[in-house]
Image (spheres, rainbow, N blue to C red):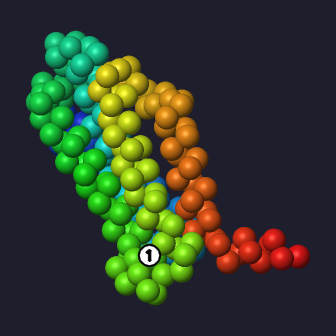
Amino acid sequence: QLYNHFLKNYAFIDILILSTGYLWRALAGCVIIEEYVSGWLYFAIFEIALFLSIAKRKGDLKLLGKEKAVEHKKVYDQYSQKLLDQFYVMTAGSLFMTYSLYLIFKFNLNIPENASLNELLVIVTIPISLYLIMRFMYLTSAKPEIARNTEKAFLDRGMIIAFFTLLVILIFSFYFDEIIEILKF
């Protein structure tokens, strides 16, 4: 209730609280199922939520215009397109680095001789993830209606192909030994 009546009217606090809400949901889910998840995942969830929140703010300002956006939500009076663009780029870079560093440390890619071939394959997902981020940024900037309804971005052919390619490589890299065991019988 504090957010709905007070904090939603303050720039930066609004998107940080929204993003933190997704983080709390992830933490609660892990507590409920009694499962440990890497801190990297929590960081990524927060960054993705922040990235999407900023995209929505950008889309609202661009689609509605400043005046109508302020009528829609008072907080838009404190945002500018330029400021949101800077936040968007900053968050995209941070998200990309989080993903890349997670892979490097998860698969010991900083010591390549300790990594197996299937683990080294995960490096291929780094440029794919960058493409996904860049494509999403392009779609939400070129078509502000997509920023307001982000699920539409995931109907883009380029996004679908890149996402499934990334997913297949990650499943193969994470579960290679299990896949081989299943194929043996």
Is there any visible trace of residue 151 in the rendered image? no
Asked if residue 159 is positioned above or below residue 39 in the image, the reply reads above
- Residue 156 at x, y = what percent? 50, 29
For the C terminus, the quadrant is bottom right
Q: Which residue is mark 1?
A: 106
Mark 1 surroundings within 10 Å by alpha-carbon count, few (fewer than 14), some (14 through 19), many (20 or more)? some
Q: Amino acid at mark 1?
A: Lys
Which residue appears at 33% of the width and 31% of the height? 138
What is the x, y in percent for residue 34?
57, 74
Q: Residue at x 43, y 27 (%)?
A: 149
- x 55%, y 38%: residue: 160
The image quarter in which residue 76 lies: top left
Q: Position of residue 159 (x, y in %)?
A: 49, 37
Please count the marks in the image. Answer: 1
The residue at 23%/21% (across/down) is: 61
Q: Nearer the viewer, residue 176 or 86?
A: 176
Q: Looking at the picture, does residue 28 appear above or below residue 86?
A: below
> Which one is in front, 55 or 77?
55
Image quadrant where one finds the N terminus: top left
Outermost residue on the bottom side: it is 114
Measured along the vertical axis of the image, is residue 114 above or below residue 46?
below
